[in-house]
Amino acid sequence: MNISEFAKVAGVSKSAVSRYFNNGYLSEDKRRKIEQAAEKTGYVPSYNARTVRTKVTKLVGVILPKLSSESISRVTEGISEVLGKEGFELLLINTANDYNREISSLELLRQKRVDGVILLASVFTDLHRSVLSKMRIPVVIVGQQFKGFNCVCHNDFGAAYAMTSLMLEKGAQHPAFLGANPDDKAAGQDRRSGFEKALSDHGITPDKSLVEIAKFNMDSGYEKAKLLFSHNPKPDCVFCATDNIAAGVILYCHENGLKIPEDVMIGGIGDSRMGKVLLTPLSSVHLHYKTAGMWGAKMLLSELKEQGDVHRILQLEYDIVERESTNRKI
Amino acid sequence: MNISEFAKVAGVSKSAVSRYFNNGYLSEDKRRKIEQAAEKTGYVPSYNARTVRTKVTKLVGVILPKLSSESISRVTEGISEVLGKEGFELLLINTANDYNREISSLELLRQKRVDGVILLASVFTDLHRSVLSKMRIPVVIVGQQFKGFNCVCHNDFGAAYAMTSLMLEKGAQHPAFLGANPDDKAAGQDRRSGFEKALSDHGITPDKSLVEIAKFNMDSGYEKAKLLFSHNPKPDCVFCATDNIAAGVILYCHENGLKIPEDVMIGGIGDSRMGKVLLTPLSSVHLHYKTAGMWGAKMLLSELKEQGDVHRILQLEYDIVERESTNRKI
DNA sequence: TTGAAAACTGATATCGGTTTCACTCGATAG
DNA sequence: CTATCGAGTGAAACCGATATCAGTTTTCAA
């Protein structure tokens, strides 16, 4: 059923129908007629046809590397909350950690004529830069800091520095680093830099053999823990780039008789909900994921109102959350 | 830039441009011209205009009660995996646990002319039934069983029965029930029925004072645990409708010197990832969330190919996962 | 050499809406 | 009594694409 057919049923003109659904001038009489006809036939105007003419989609594309991750879904929730209030819908695109799909998704979103894009970026290649700078619609990047683009990010360096320092100040002498994908600037590089800076500031020379890179999950953390603890001397503290990785390490320690925090301290990043109920409650660094999502959305909204050529970078701070896993007396 | 303008730039006709983007008959010469012009101008055809004409959106609406939940995001991941392969995009709509928004979202999706809808339903009212039966596009409901509609669901009753029986067979005499929203048929009602059936099959009369209803999160589980353990006699086992709730109970027990499983056994449902690394590793029942999402998507695809009038209900089975929290010698 | 099929072409109608525009009508002001 | 104004109206143009169709060119087997 299209607008012409429906107009006939209702006994009014096309124009009247259009006005009904867009609050234009319309007599009470016709308004009633249309309302009744709509009730009876279930007619709803086609969003696509409208968009062809009006060019507003009230749709924002959100590109994310995976769906089932606590941090990502918190960010998304923040985005959804803010944009939902303004009447926007989200077109979520899951790249499943395939960085090429980030590019093709941007292309897709241009076709769909979305009003704006929020990109939960991971890596940043030259191709990213070139495609992103060609986008004619507002784009906000959340979770990473890319010069020349609108970003909302965390202080990953500071968070890693603080957590590592905490453990060093409790007397750790052989700190191990269990990091994430080094192509990922925020979670991979910045957190590693923070770790290393803390070591040098505390006069400790990093031991290359106490460094491993894990995937973003518990099982991978467990596997890498095996490697770390096979070294001699064993690490007496492990800084993990994420809480999930840390959970894997904690499991390994419990299964292998390593006492936390006496034998080894463990620190994570992200303050995931499970942290306080883990085998050993985990010290971590709270990053304001949901807030980041909300600010990303707000930034997009302001960009939508008035597309400025000045790019803004908003960095959110962190909060240390101390629990049992680093609770060693000094 | 629209197709006519672009055609002029490329020096070909509109038709040729359309054929280029739809693999129609086109000489190599024009193909090259268009390719170059597209490269230069960055032109991409408008999805909306195309859809007005072709009526295929390659878009599936997914309505879900929240984003940041492990079970829900696993389901969504399954959906995304199957539909993505077939070239569909997902329009995710987050109702934020507002059941009225489930209705208005269905309306919205009709406007957007999506090809189909997957509904991660919670409650089921008369309004739901009436709106759902008026949808002219395929709808699949995941996670709940609603007679007269296409569903993929879990055996919630069986899962609850099995977990409760496990604890009773280990000698529990005063079982407590910590359930979820009773308006939610699957997680609320069915899991409660399973619990109660297990009790009656084991000759135990339920104690009304050992029943509480929690929200779907850890903190709520913790709060309700306070109430349960203030009773006399204290429960010697707690069946929790979800793992998150169970995690809250475990935390309470640890903080209050209740030994698990000696003083009290705890069982959950969902087999969430954190289960095996909790303060006390949690016995739970694995529900195949991702698989449910995948089957929901497959069901939708088959419905899309040929909209049958026979509705199908697919119920997935469960697997008991025993861990420390019920590890009592018989 | 011929005839039919396949490849290719572009003008035009169409999809389902919104916006414009010229016009009617009744109320109110001067 | 008339001029003015704003609400209300529907025909027609328009948005940006695809589908149709009538026609031309190329290919290739008989």
Image (spheres, coloured by chain):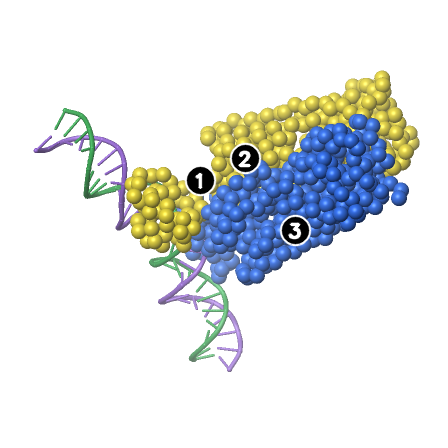
Chain colours: A yellow, B blue, C green, D purple
Q: Position of residue A274 (x, y in %)?
A: 74, 33
Q: Nearer the viewer, mark 1 or mark 3?
A: 3
Q: CA distance from mark 1 to mark 3?
A: 38 Å
Do pointers 1 and 3 mark residues of a single chain?
Answer: no
Q: Secondary structure at mark 1?
A: loop
Dot 2: chain letter: A
Report the residue marked by disc 3.
B153
Q: Position of residue A28 (x, y in %)?
A: 30, 41
- At label 1, counting other C-alpha atoms closer than 10 Å, the crowd grade (few under 14, some 14-19, many 20 or more) is few
Amino acid carrying mark 1 in the image: Val
Amino acid carrying mark 3 in the image: Cys
Dot 3: chain letter: B
Q: Nearer the viewer, mark 1 or mark 2?
A: 1
Q: Position of residue B246 (x, y in %)?
A: 74, 37
Above or below residue A206? Residue B162 is: below
Report the residue marked by disc 2.
A139
Q: Nearer the viewer, mark 3 or mark 2?
A: 3
**Is B49 or C15 nearer to us in this picture?**
C15
Dot 1: chain letter: A
